[in-house]
Image (tube, grey):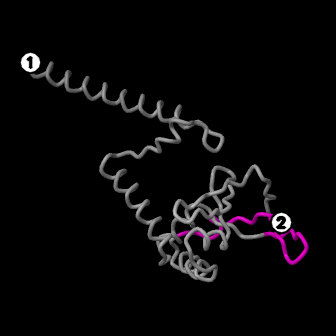
Amino acid sequence: MSNEVNSADILLYEDADTKEFVSVIFNEDNFWLSQLGMSELFGCTPENVIQHLNNIYEEEELVKEATTKKFLVVRKEGNRNVRRNIDHYNLDAIIAVGYRVNSKKATRFRQWATKTLKEYITKGFVINDDMMKNGRAFGKDYFDELLERIREIRASERRAYQKIADVFEQCSL
């Protein structure tokens, strides 16, 4: 089964240093890149991406069927526009490849990912400030979800304080 890509599904990622653009498909709440797209994103050859993907699946880091999807893409071949079913890989596979590629672009990706992961581990949360300020990124408003999660945390704090008060009450009897 393949999915036809329309222009509404395509996002352009701009590399801050090189000012190059990579076309990223946003579909079913996930980001998808072809092998060529990943090679452009990480500054390596498509063959290098294929090698890393094969190793990722062979080592069972990821399951190929869960991270791969065919998209019907129109490509220019010579003087003609040709429609081809092209394998694309979701964000899990993109991240896994980014941790294996040895290039300057991939190094910058790993630095960003490590900084983000470190913030999550030390603080217990990470917030994309721009997304929260601007809202409705990729068709969803995550601000409401964030508020709901904060309410749940606050409710559990109240329960903890009530338990402490109950313990003090029991001790004073």
What amino acid is labelled 2 in the image? Val
Residue 97 in percent (x, y) is at 53, 72
Position of 70 compared to 44: left or right?
right
What amino acid is labelled 1 in the image? Ser
Identified at 58% across, 76% down, the residue is 53
Vertical placement of residue 126 versus 146, above or below: below
Residues 106 and 172: in front is: 106
Residue 40 in percent (x, y) is at 62, 71
Identified at 55% across, 69% down, the residue is 62
Q: Quadrant of the N terminus?
A: bottom right
Residue 161, numbered label:
none
Look at the image and tell me whether residue 90 can be seen: yes
The answer to whether residue 161 is magenta is no
Q: Which residues are magenta?
A: 62-85
Mark 2 or mark 1, which is nearer the start of the sequence?
2
As measured in the structure, the alpha-carbon distance from the residue carrying label 1 to the one carrying label 2 is: 76 Å
Dots 1 and 2: beta carbons under 8 Å?
A: no
Residue 85 in percent (x, y) is at 80, 69
Residues 98 and 133: in front is: 133
Q: Which residue is mark 2?
A: 74
Identified at 56% across, 61% down, the residue is 15
Element under disc 1: loop
What main secondary structure does the magenta stretch of the protein show?
Answer: strand
Q: Determine the residue located farthest toward the top in the rendered image.
A: 173
Identified at 75% across, 49% down, the residue is 8
Q: Specify the quadrant of the image occupied by residue 41.
A: bottom right
The answer to whether residue 81 is magenta is yes
Q: Which residue is mark 1?
A: 172
Vertical placement of residue 59 versus 170, above or below: below
Q: Specify the quadrant of the image occupied by residue 173.
A: top left
Q: Specify the quadrant of the image occupied by residue 172.
A: top left
